[in-house]
Amino acid sequence: MDKIVVRGGKRLKGKIKIGGAKNAVLPMMAACLLAEGESVIRNVPLLADVITMKKVLEQLGAKVTLRGHTLHVDTSNVSRFEAPYELVRTMRASIYVLGPLLGSFGKARVSLPGGCAWGPRPVDLHIRAMQELGARIRIDHGYIVARATNLRGETIVFSLPSVGATANTMMAAARAKGKTVIVNAAREPEIVALADFINRMGGRIRGAGTETIEIEGTSRLDPAQVRVIPDRIETGTFMIAGAITAGEITLESCMPEHVEAISQKLRQGGVIVEKSRNSIYIKGKRRINSVDAVTAPYPGFPTDMQAQYMALMTIARGTCVISETVFPDRFTHVPELRRLGANIKIEGNTAHVGYVRHLSGAPVMATDLRASAALVLAGLVADGETHISRVYHIDRGYEAIEEKLSKLGADIKRMPE
């Protein structure tokens, strides 16, 4: 097991390229099951979660080849329909195979998912949507067992705009008979990207990116090629890296419109943020002002940036209030930030972050993917060395983060625990 060691105090400067979006590529990989033959996905980030999804597809009988950042998925010989516990337990996104397996083959056996160990994230919405499309579902010894003779279009109203349930429903409905309407659908860019990919296959999806998505089902889809959109959470994380170190960096190959909520908070705090068509320039200042934040579904401030933003606010002048409305108990990073000297108090789903003049390096432990990124960011500005253990979490969502930060001038290295 590796750890990351950061020696703080270096001002970041330079340019880096943002990779493909984790939360876009995983449902795209599952969507390959909707068509028989070989689909090609480009700009694939080299992440632990991608390797896990690759293994899930191979378990089903697909031939999956990763060449550099290009993924070839051949579904010609898919003959098994089970996503086993030993794979699904490590990554919640494995449940994405439920919808396309039901749509294409009429059966699926998918383990109840695992992944990051914070907060209740039930799969009820996924199951209910599949049932409304006509699937018969039971829970058997920790597995979702689903059957469907014919999926049929239906109007499905979500109680909350779930990204995972919206994606799964779109994939199943793409092969159902008739028209499906998703009301209160997730609006995230990753949903738009998935819809674009399915439409490349011959699907008929309209309204992705709005609260109402319409899917006209079809009996056949064909393999397609697609390029993964840039990762907006990696983009936001490096924006904060530039801000927290009073640095001057340019992020290339990104989509500035996807991180507007983050840009707005940084500007309010005094950071210079300039954007072009596919790049963002960040210039931080020695004095950052506190700015409150409330997480919300897209296009609001993303819950996946809450921990990283909190790391920045620990050294911001004033008192910041951060309210977590998406996953109210997503605060496992707080005790570790306190070990570095942060002044944070939790009241329910709200964090009160007070100003401290200096953070101080210490041994800390990553508890989930975004928490680990927050600890790296705090380590960039802390006095002395910060040793971050259990960094396998960060490898799930950031490709070679220590190499990219080193390129910008950070004193950071990976070493055996």
Image (cartoon, rainbow, N blue to C red):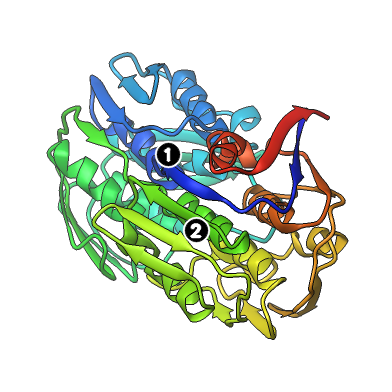
Front-most of residues 141 and 74 = 74
Q: Quadrant of residue 416?
A: top right
- Residue topped by disc 2: 239
Q: Residues within 10 Å of mark 1 (few under 14, many from 20)?
A: many
Q: Quadrant of residue 410?
A: top right
Q: Residue at x 50, y 43 (%)?
A: 93
Q: Residue at x 58, y 34 (%)?
A: 403
- Residue topped by disc 1: 26
Give the side of residue 187 with respect to residue 397, left or right: left
Label 1 vs label 2: CA separation? 24 Å
Q: Quadrant of residue 15?
A: top left
Quadrant location of the N terminus?
Answer: top right
Residue 398 at x, y percent in the picture:
55, 41
Q: Residue at x 66, y 82 (%)?
A: 320
Residue 54 at x, y percent in the picture:
47, 25
What's the amino acid at mark 2? Met
Give the side of residue 401 with respect to residue 5, left or right: left
Question: Helix, strand or loop at disc 1?
Answer: helix
Question: Does residue 133 appear in the picture of this structure?
Answer: no
Give the side of residue 33 with respect to residue 270, left or right: left
Front-most of residues 141 and 191 = 191
Front-most of residues 174 and 93 = 93
Q: Answer yes or no: do the residues labelled 1 and 2 have beta carbons within 8 Å?
A: no
Question: Does residue 239 appear in the picture of this structure?
Answer: yes
Residue 339 at x, y percent in the picture:
87, 60
Residue 411 at x, y percent in the picture:
69, 41
Instruction: Say whether disc 1 or disc 2 marks the residue closer to the N-terminus.
Output: 1
Which label was assigned to residue 210? none
What's the amino acid at mark 1? Leu
